[in-house]
Amino acid sequence: MSLFIAILPVFLLLIMGALLQRWRFPFEGFWQGVDKLVYWCLFPALLFSKTSVIDFTNPMLGRYGIVLISALLITAIFTYIAARLIHVPAPTTTSMLQGAVRFNTFITLALADRLYGTEGLIFAALGAAVLIPSVNIFLVVTMVTMHGKKQQSLGRLIVKELLRNPLILAIALGLGLNAVNLTPIPIVSDMTQMLAQATLPLVLLAVGAGVKLTAIRSVGASFWWSAMGRFAVFPCSVLLVCWLLEIQGLAVYVALLFGVVPTATSAYALAKQLGGDADNMAAFITLQTAMSLVTVPFSIALAQSWLG
């Protein structure tokens, strides 16, 4: 109950955002503008602020990255096999993969900050730095291979997706400057830190406002297999690899967050762009966001009772 109370404000902000959008408050189109502000300005500032201060001398960083990449691969294999077993078409298969391996970065960082403070937020930013480029490259390659237009250049598409993603650019800039000991940068680091402090509450409202309740239809078995990958296979893979690599403590709990939050809202845009099943993707996003009200406290409580 104490855990549920600790994370309840995060989900109340999501619900508030959905209600504000439904009531068209403060005016029509406002939250679409906020969503762009968060995506192009505030959240990149937060990621730059946190990745620019990561301590690269920590010997556990390499193993932490292995945990997340391993969980991504195991979950992708499970979901692809499940899609083959239920005989869904290629566009639905790639939407199932997006639902399983993508994660909502905004909610993950908000939960890490709420539950584990500054150190947890830095671990979450590091995890995002590992997974965001990896997930994007994996999905673009998979979608183009399975149902993309033959005249599209795979390499060009990957570079395009990476270079136009402000989160990836902010992570690369923060890690790059940090690696050559050019951070903190006077004034710039202070400004990004101030923007970072304003990001998480606003981003949760924007995520809630972006939930499309009208997208929910009879999603069928494809949704449940994808949700199993997202909420069961991914976190179990994290715990298994952490156990194998003898990783303990805060790193385990933060890594676990990447497997218990819903899929990213940006999955819908990628499905439309590269020929995935966009209608099912919209339903996956909405239903997973609702399910995470249960999966997050249950999974973390279960992990704490098991790991201590």
Image: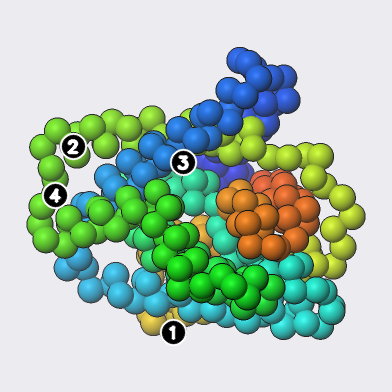
Decide if residue 248 is in sight here. yes
Location of residue 54 (image quadrant) = bottom left
> Label 2 amino acid?
Val
- Out of 154 and 22, give the one closest to the viewer: 154
State which tag comes first along the sequence, 1 or 3: 3
Q: Nearer the viewer, mark 4 or mark 3?
A: 3
Which of the numbered marks, if any, corresponds to residue 39? 3
Q: Secondary structure at mark 2?
A: helix
Identify which residue is drawn at 39% across, 82% down. Answer: 245
Circles 2 and 1: CB atoms closer than 8 Å: no
Q: Nearer the viewer, mark 4 or mark 1?
A: 4
State which tag comes first along the sequence, 4 or 2: 4
Q: Which residue lies most toward the front here?
A: 151
The colour scheme of the drawn protein is: rainbow
- Out of 18 and 152, give the one closest to the viewer: 152
Query: How many residues crowd mark 1 within 10 Å: few (<14), some (14–19), many (20+)?
Result: few
> Label 3 amino acid?
Tyr
Locate residue 308, reporting x and y percent. 47, 64
Decide if residue 9 is in sight here. no
State which tag comes first along the sequence, 4 or 1: 4
Using the image, determine if residue 109 lies above or below residue 62: above
Which residue is tagged 1? 244
Location of residue 30 (image quadrant) = top right
Q: Nearer the viewer, mark 2 or mark 1?
A: 2
Q: How far is mark 1 from mark 3, CA to CA? A: 36 Å
Q: Secondary structure at mark 3?
A: helix
Which residue is tagged 2? 188
Which residue is tagged 4? 183
State which tag comes first along the sequence, 4 or 3: 3
> Label 4 amino acid?
Thr
Q: How far is mark 4 from mark 2, CA to CA? A: 10 Å
Q: How far is mark 4 from mark 1, CA to CA? A: 34 Å
